[in-house]
Image (cartoon, grey):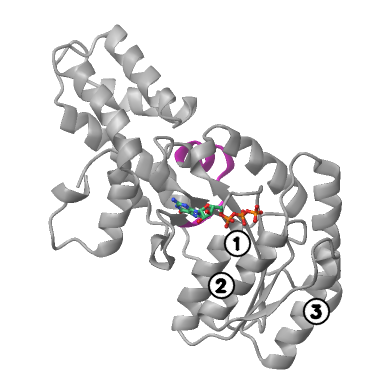
Amino acid sequence: MSETSPPEKPGFWRRLTSGLARTATSLTQGITDLVTKRKLDAETLEELEDLLIRADLGTATAARIVEAVGKGRHDKMIAPDEVKGLIASEVEEILGPVAKPFVPDAGQKPFVVLMVGVNGSGKTTTIGKLAAQWRSEGKRLTLAAGDTFRAAAIEQLKVWGARTGAHVVAREQGADAAGVAHDAITEARANGSDIVMIDTAGRLQNRTELMDELEKVVRVVKKLEPTAPHAVLLVLDATVGQNALNQVEVFARTAGVTGLVMTKLDGTARGGILVAIAQKYRLPIHLVGVGEGAEDLQPFSARDFSRAIAGLD
Ligand SMILES: Nc1nc2c(ncn2[C@@H]2O[C@H](COP(=O)(O)OP(=O)(O)OP(=O)(O)O)[C@@H](O)[C@H]2O)c(=O)[nH]1
């Protein structure tokens, strides 16, 4: 994919298209095989619908695309590129209303961001990437190592702090996460931080415990600053496919999620799940991760994503 992109395209577009290449290829190859030699009869449309569902786009989105493709073309031939164009435009219509840049409100000082998501979804890495981007804009940051369940998560956050020049508040493994969040906000006020990002543990195995811990963090944060947390970002790993829908359900209910970040779109053929989530939950989608480097976390663009997933350049 990336090698066919025109050289004048910006770097993030290349990263997005190459990141989404696996999703796009599995979808568009199937489409080409399907429509090249066959008319758009009911059977072909049904197979197209199956392909779209298998690409994790969701049944509602698949039905919508099939309707757009079939409209006025029954028993006619259609070029694969035309199908791709229709997929891109239907997907863009779903994603357009939920694509929202993540811009901390400078009027809130510090602007408090709570990061939630299951283990390994990429929370800590996303905090690090955001820290790198905001530090390069000259913002002052405090990071709270609230994933006290795993020593490695605390260490990882310290590494990002050292790398980016963000202040890190951490305690030992097993410490009270709400206590870490409390200290972080207090220290952020003292050191004049613009933004506080609070990492959290994401043990979905025990939902009650997770809920209690998150609620306690929020309660303690609110005691210090009633308007906080100003944002609750749910970090989702695209490679888990349909399971991501379940995660949105649980975290939206327990943590008052205000927006989504989807990571690891580069390592999966299941990037379509983002469309299913947008279709079902209509939560703002702020950022997408297409690699492990700081520059691989990109603001979510409905148009770029829709074209990339449909294999258009
Ligand atoms: N390929 C790829 N890897 C990513 C991306 N985002 C995060 N990762 C990797 O995913 C792994 C897990 O990320 P973490 O940030 O440790 O996940 P976490 O949610 O903090 O996990 P816990 O600390 O266990 O709660 C790491 O190896 C990251 O480098 C992405 O967009 N693309």
How far is the residue under mark 3 from the one under mark 1?
19 Å
The crowding category of the residue bearing disc 3, from other C-alpha atoms within 10 Å (few below 14, some 14 to 19, many at least 20), is: some
Q: Nearer the viewer, residue 235 or 60?
A: 235
**Of pointers 3 and 1, the one earlier in the residue sequence:** 1
Q: Is residue 75 above or below residue 136?
A: above
Asked whether, in this view, residue 165 is left or right of residue 136, the answer is right
Judged by depth in the image, the label closer to the viewer, 3 or 2, is: 2
The crowding category of the residue bearing disc 1, from other C-alpha atoms within 10 Å (few below 14, some 14 to 19, many at least 20), is: many
| Residue topped by disc 1 | 124
Tell me the magenta residue range.
275-287
Q: Nearer the viewer, residue 74 or 239?
A: 239
Residue 110 visible in image: yes
Label 1: element kind: helix
**Residue 295 in the image: x percent, y percent?**
39, 66
| Residue topped by disc 2 | 160
The amino acid on which the numbered mark 2 sits, given as a three-letter code, is: Trp
The amino acid on which the numbered mark 3 sits, given as a three-letter code, is: Asp
**Of pointers 2 and 1, the one earlier in the residue sequence:** 1
Q: Is residue 6 above or below residue 29?
A: below
The amino acid on which the numbered mark 1 sits, given as a three-letter code, is: Thr
| Residue topped by disc 3 | 183
